Amino acid sequence: MCPALRSVLLISMLGCVELISVTTPHKHVNVTKGAGALLQCVFQSTEQSTAALTVQWDFASTASMPQQVYYFQGGRDVVPEAYAGRLQPPSSPGTTKNASIWIRDMQPSDSGIYTCQVHNFPDVDGPSEANVIVNVLEKPSVPYCAVHGDVESGHRVTLTCHSEHGSPNPKYTWIRLDQTKTRRPVLGTATEKGTLEFGNISQFEFGEYQCTSTNAVGFSTCVIELSAEVSDGVVAGAVVGALLGCVLIALVVWFIAHVLKKHKYNRVKQTEANEMKRSTPQAQQASDQGTVATPASNLHVEEDEHQA
């Protein structure tokens, strides 16, 4: 026995040092996203009184700064705002010697190391803390499939597949589907990171391909069609050309309609002018005839009066 340990045991036997022991039955906890997790922590103390008992839970991860999760002292629970409504504190830890906590609705950001610390003055020696490593598992999200390269015989073409979310990190597999949706092995070079590469693609490799993103929780799939098609630049040029053609056609139609409308307006005005010209001599002739008729009628009246 080493001298240091012998000294500690001797002092402990003399009653000068109080001992405390904090342990956890499960050092690793796996929980699915959205579920609750029980973080267990129990302790033993040679001090019978628990009036000075303190319990503290801390959390640390590579993605965030260390933070306090729970604190207990003098029979009072303290839960930070970030865990309010999610954390269920231990019940009477001084009596039950149980400092376990329950956290609801676990998210991937909750993955990390949780540390349980227990002190019961005058305990000043012994293992006063225990760590629980929590992994929040998440099913892979629906992956995004894409084609890179000119899909033509003899060209290099790469298919990619990636899930934005998933814990642990998903692995990817590719299969080919024929016309009856029967699975066929792929002829290209596939990796677990989601790429499928064809160094010299041929028509025999055209078809429908399915990527499956898998981890310990579940899987998700995406499907993409690999067929002969024009390159992205040609497609973009065709789209732009079609749009410009539509604009040009619209301008031509507008111009023709405007010209026809103008010609129609001019014809109407010309017709009205011609009508006015024709109506003016007729009115003048009618006026002259009326002037000549009046003397003739007067002669008849005068002859009648003379005969009488």
Image (cartoon, grey):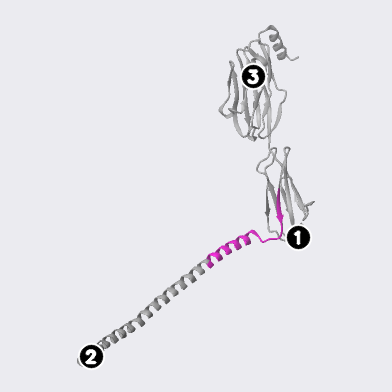
Between marks 3 and 2 in the image, the one whose residue lies nearer the viewer: 2
Q: What span is in magenta?
A: 222-249
Which residue in the protein does label 1 denote? 203
Question: Tag 2 or tag 3, which sits nearer the N-term?
Answer: 3
Residue bearing mark 3? 91
Q: Which residue is mark 2?
A: 304
Q: Residues within 10 Å of mark 3 (few under 14, many from 20)?
A: some
x and y percentages locating residue 10 in the rendered image: 71, 9
The reply to whether the magenta stretch includes residue 223 is yes
Is 85 rendered above or below residue 119? below
Label 1 element class: helix
- Does residue 198 show up? no
Closer to the observer: label 1 or label 3?
A: 3
> What's the residue at 51%, 69% (across, down)?
253
Dot placed on the residue nearer the N-terminal end, 1 or 3? 3
In the image, which is nearer the foreground, mark 2 or mark 1?
2
